[in-house]
Amino acid sequence: MVYFDSHCHLNDEAFASDLEETVAKAREAGLKAILVLGYDVISSRLAVEIASKYDICYAGVGIHPENYEGLSIDDIKQIEELSHNEKVIAIGEVGLDYHWKNDEETKANQKAFFIEQIKLANKLGLPLSIHARDASEDTFNILNEYRPTSGAVLHCYSGSVEMMERFAKLDLYFGFDGPLTYKNSIVPKECVKVINVDRLLVETDSPYLSPVPFRGKRNEPAYIPYIFNMMAELKGLTETELEEKLNANFSRLFHVKL
Ligand SMILES: [Zn+2]
């Protein structure tokens, strides 16, 4: 089996002491591509460094909606500079997050950073990895107005089935993670069943959101098969059938052959 992890954070300090072993373990598990996403300038730079060091690692660079404080729109130029590295295959993670703060000023700032980074992705011809939490409607409106011209994935999709069907009309992809394996996680399972398999991706978002049976422990790319197997079961496909579909989706969006 050949797998990928389309969204993780090997640049998180949780991997500082055993990055080498973590990548080796992922390789043994069958992963041929690991997309490491930045969430501010420093973590984006680290993502590029990791991607330069390990052949199976790739980088996404971007400023996460929770990290714009203390930055100006001008700082996106640093993201643009990093994006010129040949292992950078996406702009992300970027988007909107109204979970902790949702006053008008916060929303306006997050929107400005999101829009600017969509424009950057379009200018560079790169797909986007989008984080949207408690902000489905605004995320939809922005993507509807500023269409990503090189594709985009809503990573760790956590919205409703109805919202997903609206997003699907914008040609977006949907990434699913460890929560798909949780018993009480009804809506993500329903989403996976409903959406066309040509729109699906698997990701770990490690070090967060470990799948069963590792729930509560640090997550890592080598655990992708647990999420993949649950997705195959939900779609009623054999592992080989799903492998072929998902790997084609990953290659189509990120232009990386698996
Ligand atoms: Zn993430």
Image (cartoon, rainbow, N blue to C red):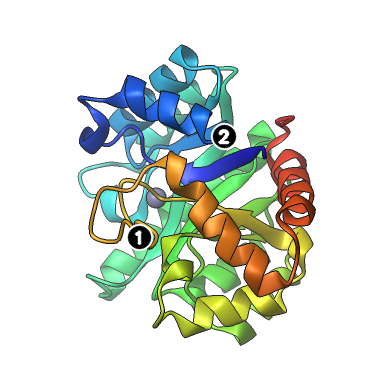
- For the C terminus, the image quarter is top right
How far across and down, in percent of the image, does residue 174 sit?
Answer: 61, 62
Above or below, 160 against 126 in this view is below
Q: Nearer the viewer, residue 96 or 221?
A: 221
Q: Nearer the viewer, residue 207 or 113?
A: 207
> Crowdedness of circle 1 by 10 Å Cα count: few (<14), some, many (20+)?
few
- Residue at point 36% right, 47% down? 206
Q: In which quarter of the image is residue 78?
A: top left
Q: Tell me if residue 20 can be seen.
A: yes
| Residue underneath mark 2 | 31
- For the N terminus, the image quarter is top right
Q: Which of 167 and 7 is in front in this view?
A: 7
- Residue at point 55% right, 24% down? 56
| Residue underneath mark 1 | 213
Question: Looking at numbered disc 2 in the image, what kind of residue is underneath it?
Answer: Leu
Q: Nearer the viewer, residue 143 or 242?
A: 242
> Crowdedness of circle 2 by 10 Å Cα count: few (<14), some, many (20+)?
many
Above or below, 238 against 74 in this view is below
How far across and down, in percent of the image, does residue 126 sit?
Answer: 65, 37
Residues at marks 2 and 1, CA–CA distance in whole angstroms: 19 Å
- Residue at point 51% right, 67% down? 157
CB under 8 Å between discs 2 and 1: no
Q: In which quarter of the image is residue 229?
A: bottom right
Q: Tell me if residue 116 can be seen.
A: no
- Residue at point 33% right, 48% down? 219
Q: Under tag 2, what secondary structure? A: strand
Above or below, 81 against 44 in this view is above
